[in-house]
Amino acid sequence: MRYAIMAFLSLVAASGYADTALHSALERIAGQRIYFAHQSVGANILDGVRELAQAEGVALRIAEQPGADAIPEGTLAHFFVPENGAPLTKLRNFEAALGEGARVDVALLKFCYVDVDAQTDAKALFERYRGTIGRLRQKNPRTVFVHVTLPLTTEQTGPKAWVKRLMGRTPYGTVENLRREEYNALLRKAYAGREPVFDLARLESTAPDGHAVTVSWDGVTAPAMAREYTQDGGHLNEQGRLRVARELIRVLASEARGAL
């Protein structure tokens, strides 16, 4: 699958064909200072961004940089914010890394799916996130903050999942995705239509044919990751990362300084 996608991208580049909207968006973000805090799913997304930039012939500089104090102009800087499974620690580390007075045009923090489990208090986590962003906005008034919904996972299937349900227990990916949706609903309510939102969960839960993938438990339904976009139930495969990367590029370009 990987080789087929890379061959397609190479063919597009060689043919001289360009996706006008994508090309224009990549050129806009190529001149910005962007700071992206993430873990492994974020790395998947950045792989997709690199592939799309290569296919469009846009020289987009992507560089790992722990702190935001010296990001060169024209750089999509990123860092692996510690640590997975500890979202409050990630918030503290993101706040420390961005600091005060950073010359950053756009900043965003993406939690990982492992940061939320069945016991997570989604409302409390969101309030901590909102408080962190509020403080950072005061310290960095020139920076636009893009809010990212929590990524999802597929729901466990097969004999083990069937036995769990028979015993009144939830297969993995059921309650966890319900908790993620609780957080994501709060984020959308707070920011959608007022501040930029990169709705990663919506992208992951919309199958290639357009139908919404969901899980249900105890009368509650929530989005889940479409199996077409992952090889292991959580990380993005080639199809998934290109789909998500294209939307991230669009969102970042819409917030770029000087964007029309």
Image (cartoon, helix red, strand yellow):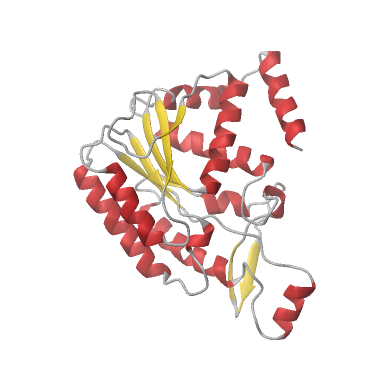
Above or below for 148 versus 258:
below
Residue 197 in view of the camera: yes
- What residue is drawn where x is 20% and y is 37%? 101
- Disc tally is 0
Residue 246 shows in the view: no
Q: Quarter of the image containing the N terminus?
A: top right
Q: Nearer the viewer, residue 232 or 214?
A: 232
Q: Nearer the viewer, residue 138 or 114?
A: 114
Q: Residue 64 placed where, x, y %?
A: 44, 35
Q: Quadrant of residue 86?
A: bottom left
Q: Is residue 230 left or right of residue 222?
A: right
Q: Residue 115, image x and y in percent?
A: 48, 61
Q: Does residue 211 sit above or below 144 in this rendering?
A: below
Residue projecting furthest to the bottom? 167
Quadrant of residue 155 within the rendered picture: bottom right
Q: Position of residue 44 (x, y in %)?
A: 58, 42
> Which of the 4 quarters of the picture holds residue 223?
bottom right
Percent of width and height locating residue 238: 67, 40
**Left or right: where 135 falls relative to 150:** left
Name the side, left or right, on which 52 lies relative to 232.
left
Residue sticking out furthest to the right: 159
